[in-house]
Image (tube, rainbow, N blue to C red):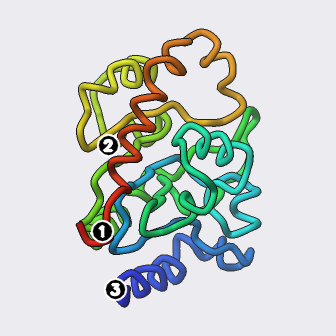
């Protein structure tokens, strides 16, 4: 935990994040050495940034439902670590939010992930995270539909934003095929005594 705390202080002190510190924003992520399931998402929304809690919005409630866990389990850092592609709200765009900064995840994720050796399953949520971690030319839909190709240790997901309701309506297989397998894999990943 000491090294994780040191990295958090480095993130806050990094000159590229001075604007966030000036606004009173803390970095929004969750890292614990005993975490079993890692969620790599986009950047926090404004509600999450203001509250200081990852996925503290309607997207988070939908994600919890998809995972098949309760709020207490989702907030348990030994069950779920959460590393957005940027740890700060990026601001508003003409439609939706600005993208996460492209250089942020490469700078901080590897160091944090190295300190979480008990991760069993990584959920890669949204197009930005998938492009960075999965590469290739497949679309988000193709990656999510072929989720079995990434098992047993990675699981691509669409972002749980309420703006994705049209995508979910066009892709009913997500609810019938993907979510049951997701819940099973998450249950397996977080089950058992800490340290395994």
Q: Which mark is residue 137?
A: none
Label 2, label 1: how many angstroms apart (C-alpha)? 17 Å
Q: Position of residue 72 (x, y in %)?
A: 60, 62
Q: Which residue is mark 2?
A: 133
User: What secondary structure is found at the residue carrying circle 1?
Assistant: loop
Q: Residues within 10 Å of mark 3 (few under 14, many from 20)?
A: few
Label 3, label 2: how many angstroms apart (C-alpha)? 24 Å
Q: Residue at x 76, y 57 (%)?
A: 47
Q: Position of residue 196 (x, y in %)?
A: 23, 66
Residue mark closest to the camera, 3 vs 1: 1
Question: In the picture provided, is 161 more to the left or to the right than 14?
Answer: right
Please state, as top left, top right, bottom left or bottom right, where the N terminus lies in the image.
bottom left
Q: Please tell me which residue lies in front, 27 or 144.
A: 144
Q: Which residue is mark 1?
A: 116
Mark 3 or 1, nearer chain start: 3
Q: Residues within 10 Å of mark 1 (few under 14, many from 20)?
A: many
Q: Residue at x 45, y 28 (%)?
A: 180
Q: Which residue is mark 3?
A: 3
């Amino acid at each position: 935990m000491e090294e994780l705390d040191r990295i958090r202080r480095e993130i806050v002190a990094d000159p590229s994040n001075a604007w966030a510190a000036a606004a009173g924003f803390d970095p929004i992520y969750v890292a614990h050495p005993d975490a079993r399931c890692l969620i790599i998402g986009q950047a926090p929304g404004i509600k999450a940034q203001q509250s200081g809690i990852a996925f503290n919005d309607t997207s988070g409630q939908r994600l919890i439902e998809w995972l098949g866990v309760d709020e207490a389990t989702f907030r348990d850092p030994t069950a779920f670590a959460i590393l957005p592609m940027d740890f700060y709200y990026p601001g508003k765009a003409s439609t939706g939010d600005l993208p996460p900064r492209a250089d942020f995840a490469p700078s901080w994720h590897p160091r944090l992930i190295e300190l979480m050796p008990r991760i069993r399953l990584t959920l890669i949520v949204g197009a930005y995270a998938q492009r960075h971690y999965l590469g290739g030319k497949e679309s988000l839909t193709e990656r999510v539909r072929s989720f079995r190709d990434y098992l047993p240790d990675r699981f691509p997901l669409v972002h749980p934003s309420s703006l994705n309701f049209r995508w979910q309506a066009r892709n009913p297989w997500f609810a019938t095929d993907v979510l049951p397998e997701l819940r099973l894999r998450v249950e397996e990943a977080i089950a058992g005594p800490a340290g395994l």
